[in-house]
Image: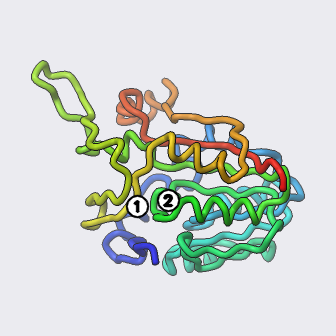
Amino acid sequence: MAQNIYDNADFFNGYSQLPRQVKGLDGAPEWPAIRAMLPTVKNKNVADLGCGFGWAARWLREQGAAEVHGYDLSENMIERARADTADPAIDYHIADLDTLALPKACFDLVYSALAFHYVENFPRLVTTIGQALVDGGDLVFSIEHPIFMAARHPHWIADEDGRKTWPVNGYAMEGERRTDWFAKGVLKYHRTLATTLNTLTEAGFALRHIAEFAPTQDQIAATPDLAEELERPMMLIISACKTGS
């Protein structure tokens, strides 16, 4: 079973104060890039893996999705999502993505935001997603960028000349990485970019588009701290398509 850090009281309280949880999708600077990579969802069935508070699920329904099923390990997340959702076409489920079971050939789109880096067995999850998608169905997801995941320090440090650097630690050494973020010992799984992409293609997905998120100048002007994201990628966004049986 995956680490259920989101039901840790300290973690959940801190996480709930993030702009992306207070403002929803408008508080996520990468959202315009993700939105541009999403297919048309009108009359489509969608699964949202790691659905959190349900922001994306509700947006997908606003865009005309027929049904949205949200899956999250955290009871706190699902409780909040259900409380904030008054739409019978959205259904939320408590589920561990490491052991997730989905109905076969049921979904036109599987979407996920910043959840797959918590999954230990990524190949199993990708296979499960592929089986759950109809032929030609889409997978769009974001994860922490492998370079960011492998950083020895989450923020820049100054080198001997005073320049900003983000030292990377054992990029080729895949596996568990632990960090202190709202709580001690938050567990994530580092995979190289090659491993992530090869896992998708080996499972029968065709890559559509890959984005290494960087903020726009307008976003930096509004939120100067985002300038750090120009120095090293923090998020990787992938769009892929199931190529058929």
Q: Quadrant of residue 238?
A: top right
Determine which residue is flagged by label 1. 17
Within 10 Å of the Cα at label 2, are there few (<14), some (14-19), or many (20+) other Cα atoms?
A: some
Q: Residue 171: x, y in percent?
A: 34, 42
Q: Residue 8: x, y in percent?
A: 36, 76
Q: Nearer the viewer, residue 136 or 109?
A: 136
Which quarter of the image is occupied by the C terminus? bottom right
Q: Is residue 180 left or right of residue 195?
A: left
Residue lying at the far top in this picture: please name it. 161
Q: In this view, does 116 lie to the left or right of 227?
A: right
Q: In this view, does 178 lie to the left or right of 7?
A: left
Local SS, label 2: helix
Q: Do the residues labelled 1 and 2 touch (CB within 8 Å)?
A: yes
Q: Residue 211: x, y in percent?
A: 58, 34
Determine which residue is flagged by label 2. 21
Residue lying at the far right in this picture: please name it. 43
Within 10 Å of the Cα at label 1, are there few (<14), some (14-19), or many (20+) other Cα atoms?
A: few
Vertical relation: 160 (above or below) 223: above
* Residue shown at the point (38%, 29%) measured from the top left: 227
- Disc 1 versus disc 2: distance between alpha carbons? 6 Å
